[in-house]
Image: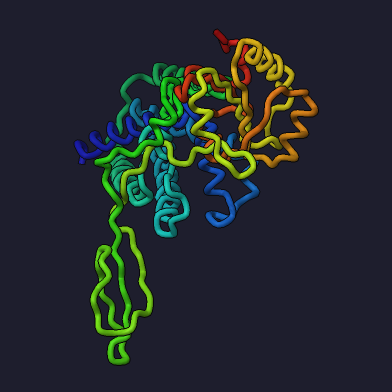
Amino acid sequence: MRYLVAISRIFVGILFIISGFIKLNDPVGFSFKLEEYFSQGVLDLPVFEPYALAISIFVVIFEVLLGVMLLVGFRVKFTVWSLLLMIVGFTFLTFYSAYYNKVTDCGCFGDAIKLTPWESFTKDIILLVLIVLLFIGQKYITPLFDIKIRRIVIVFSVLVCIVYCNYVLNHLPVIDFRPYKIGANIEEGMTVPEDAPKPIYDYAWRFKVNGEDKIIVTQGDYPQVDGEFVDVETTEVQKGYEPPIHDFTIEQGGEDFSSGLLQEPKLVMVIAYDLRKTNEAIYPEVKSITDKALDTGYKVIGMSASNEEQTQALIDQYKLAFEFYFTDETTLKTIVRSNPGVLVLHKGTIVQKVHYNDLNDLKFD
């Protein structure tokens, strides 16, 4: 039992620190995932949506701390109880989203590692077993250092988490795991290789044969049956290749201009996924920066999921010298964790990306 507890302690502690740190690197992204869970149709708890960011910050910092506390053996009873309650909650959420197909990615490891709902649930079941072992054998979780050093380690961990979280909230994630990171080419990210795996479907064909239902399952071919066709039910049994970027458009008037705009050698994108939530106080600086870009030969566009009335009102209020295009809100949230945020592209390749607090860092050659 002692050795099982020791192995579980190391594995669970390290996993919680890694999982928490990845989300701590991008608490805004994790808050978007929480909003999905809180939304109507999933947990139906919209009252918590306005507090999603605060909850995400608390959860990820607490997750890191639990991992550290477990490894150093600090307040063992509180630690194992907290781990048990947290993993029971996570297991419920991942089972719910997997069984009802509500949230297709749990966000357990942010954008670094994508898990399907059932993979997430399996991971949580394994963790639940290991944490139950820790709970039963908590007497074997002995401290690594004396109490003073353990307290110093915990306080230091809290301070590091707070400072790091504050930095990424006011700038951008230090490590960008998304397909829109600096150096990525958007068009290449949308390309499907010729030898990419294709999706496989089962087709359940139903016929009336001599007055009785007859179902024949194939993977595409229409079966030759001496009977009356009734209907067919399609089931995806194997997913095909999905490019990293698969939902990117730049629309105006119902027309997609992305292919042309992504060939621009000097393109600036001002991204504000929702103008109702954007930081309007920064738009005088946005105007100054974008006017400078226009003067140096850049094409400037705005990208938002807000309607034309809202975008035009913003243009008029701050006398912006560029037009807005429509792009899906989820896509814009993925591109940059800032509302607004600014990207500079060269023929579809992202060469600069900044939070609105860092607009002065932009360079226009």
| Residue 216, image quadrant | bottom left
Instruction: Indicate the quadrant containing the C terminus: top left, top right, bottom left or bottom right.
Output: top right
Give the residue at the far front of this rendering.
Answer: 260
Residue sitting at x 50%, y 18%? 265
Where residue 21 appears, as percent x and y from the top left, is 42, 28
Residue sitting at x 45%, y 32%? 23
Give the residue at the far top of this rendering.
Answer: 365
The answer to whether residue 15 of the structure is visible from this angle is: yes
Where residue 315 appears, as percent x and y from the top left, is 75, 28
Where residue 160 appears, as percent x and y from the top left, is 48, 18
In the depicted structure, whether residue 137 falls above or below residue 269: below
Instruction: Indicate the quadrant containing the N terminus: top left, top right, bottom left or bottom right.
Output: top left
Residue 325 falls left or right of residue 123: right
Given residues 173 and 129, the one toward you in this image is 173
The answer to whether residue 159 of the structure is visible from this angle is: no
Residue sitting at x 39%, y 16%? 149
Where residue 68 appears, as percent x and y from the top left, is 38, 27
Give the residue at the far bottom of this rendering.
Answer: 211
What's the coloring here?
rainbow
Given residues 183 and 110, the one toward you in this image is 183
Residue sitting at x 75%, y 30%? 314
In the depicted structure, whether residue 179 falls above or below residue 362: below
Given residues 175 and 180, the one toward you in this image is 180
Numbered-mark total: 0
Residue 161 falls left or right of residue 357: left
| Residue 183, image quadrant | top left
Given residues 181 and 38, the one toward you in this image is 181
